[in-house]
């Protein structure tokens, strides 16, 4: 029997709370006078997070000509918003990366897919707009609902995957078994953790981009990037199929017959450059 | 020698001219044989096209092209089943072919 949304939220009462460091980071960066020093002071309280952040900042993906060795320097060179988004991505991967005893999804491959979506969505977005860093975070977090379901509702999600394995598309399987999709579940976390509105929009509407009322370009980019990551087989979403991309979203970025092959090649190269920095390269992968 | 879009470079091609950075310093010398890392570096730097050798046989472009075509066909076979729910749409068929080509260039 399907659980009501409230019952579902209740059963997730042991969802981790937002890490204090992110809470503080959001607070500090929301003040207009926020400086690189302020951000560094918050983030450097967590040495593990700082080390991971610097590894990502120094990866070839960001193409820095000189290595940065402090958070403050990373903020100066890459910009506060980039570092803030990087901290959000790394921190959430830490919280959910090793939780639960999973049966229905390969969580490491799922995070590789999320990273593939992030790289794809950012590249797609930047063909038309500036400031793809917010889209990158949206890509990292777009499927967080799947990871939550697999961690906190394992039996039910096992049923979803069983139905999907029989050939039913994933979203249909989720609706039939749970009565709602991973996107709706991801939104619960987004609200509980008070994610920025754009990020909540990308999580909630990446499969229904026409329904969003906020950040339409961002949502469209994650919608397109999600399918590109699957097409390039960057990690594994637990959806077997590359599903149809909404034509309006496709036209938003590729209407003029732009060099799609070139863009996909660039995305693929960028993904393989950054997966190491996020500690996601499979151990048996070719170097 | 011909001008080649960076997105269509394949490992093994040889540069027919020096590549210079914004300040005019040479970042890659004429004669450099491209590998994956070098091609990624060019993509990252935002280089759009480079001059590559074509007619002295050293980069064997014809062989590369034929090999690439075979690899694209291989990749299309891999992708077709996962595109079974979408490839009847014109734009999704374009995506499938582009993905097959990108994957073939890396394989």
Image (tube, rainbow, N blue to C red):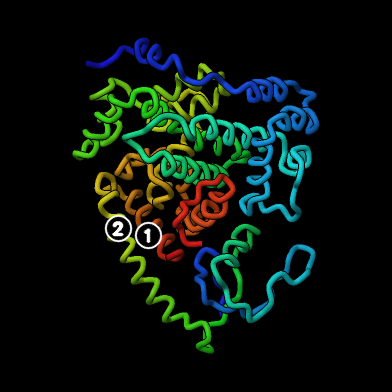
Which quadrant is the N terminus of chain A positioned in?
top left
Between A61 and A247, the one lying in front of the other is A61
Is residue A209 visible in this depiction of the protein? no
Residue picked out by circle 1: B100
Q: Which chain hosts label 2?
A: B
Q: Which chain hosts label 1?
A: B
Between B38 and A125, the one lying in front of the other is B38
Residue picked out by circle 2: B78
Left or right: A63 as drawn, with respect to A96: right
Between A98 and A19, the one lying in front of the other is A98
Asked whether disc 2 touches disc 1, contact meaning CB atoms under 8 Å apart, the reply is yes
Between A49 and B63, the one lying in front of the other is A49
Whether B38 is drawn above or below A12: the answer is below
Write the residue at 58% across / 36% down.
A90
Is residue A13 visible in this depiction of the protein? yes
The image quadrant of residue A176 is top left
Q: Nearer the viewer, mark 2 or mark 1?
A: 2
Residue A211 screen position, x and y as percent = 41, 25
| Sequence-wise first label, 2 or 1 | 2
Residue A49 screen position, x and y as percent = 65, 35
The image quadrant of residue A144 is top left
Q: Residues within 10 Å of mark 2 (few under 14, many from 20)?
A: few
Left or right: A274 as drawn, with respect to B19: left
Write the residue at 55% across / 43% down.
A122
Residue A191 screen position, x and y as percent = 51, 18
Q: Residue furthest left?
A: A166
Whether A13 is drawn above or below A114: the answer is above
Q: Residues within 10 Å of mark 1 (few under 14, many from 20)?
A: many
- The Cα atoms of the two marked residues, 2 and 1, are separated by 9 Å
Q: Residue furthest bottom?
A: B56
């Amino acid at each position: 029997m399907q659980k009501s949304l409230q019952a579902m939220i209740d059963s997730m009462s042991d969802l981790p709370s937002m890490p204090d460091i992110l809470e503080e980071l959001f607070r500090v960066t929301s003040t207009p006078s926020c400086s690189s020093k302020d951000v560094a002071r918050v983030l450097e309280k967590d040495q593990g997070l700082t080390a991971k952040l610097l590894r990502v900042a120094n990866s070839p993906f960001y193409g820095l000509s000189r290595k940065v060795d402090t958070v403050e320097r990373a903020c100066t060179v890459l910009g506060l918003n980039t570092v803030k988004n990087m901290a959000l991505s790394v921190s959430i991967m830490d919280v959910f990366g090793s939780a639960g005893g999973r049966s229905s999804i390969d969580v490491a491959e799922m995070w590789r897919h999320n990273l593939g979506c992030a790289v794809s969505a950012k590249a797609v977005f930047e063909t038309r707009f500036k400031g793809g860093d917010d889209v990158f975070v949206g890509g990292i977090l777009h499927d967080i609902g799947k990871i939550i379901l697999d961690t906190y509702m394992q039996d039910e999600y096992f049923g979803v995957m069983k139905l999907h394995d029989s050939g039913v598309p994933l979203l249909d399987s989720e609706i039939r078994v749970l009565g709602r999709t991973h996107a709706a579940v991801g939104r619960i976390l987004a609200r509980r953790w008070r994610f920025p509105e754009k990020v909540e929009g990308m999580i909630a509407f990446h499969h229904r981009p026409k329904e969003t009322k906020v950040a339409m370009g961002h949502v469209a980019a994650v919608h397109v990037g999600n399918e590109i990551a699957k097409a390039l087989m960057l990690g594994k979403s637990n959806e077997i199929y590359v599903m149809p991309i909404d034509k309006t979203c496709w036209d938003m970025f590729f209407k003029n017959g732009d060099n799609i092959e070139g863009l996909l090649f660039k995305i693929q190269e960028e993904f393989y450059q950054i997966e190491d920095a996020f500690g996601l390269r499979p151990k048996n992968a070719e170097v | 020698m011909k001008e080649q879009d960076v997105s269509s470079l394949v490992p093994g091609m040889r540069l027919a001219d020096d590549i210079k950075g914004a300040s005019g310093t040479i970042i890659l010398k004429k004669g450099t044989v491209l590998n994956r890392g070098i091609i990624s570096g060019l993509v990252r730097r935002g280089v759009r096209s480079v001059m590559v050798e074509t007619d002295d046989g050293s980069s064997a472009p014809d062989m590369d092209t034929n090999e690439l075509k075979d690899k694209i066909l291989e990749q299309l076979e891999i992708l077709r089943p996962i595109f079974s729910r979408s490839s009847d749409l014109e734009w999704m068929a374009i995506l499938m072919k582009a993905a097959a080509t990108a994957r073939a260039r890396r394989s």
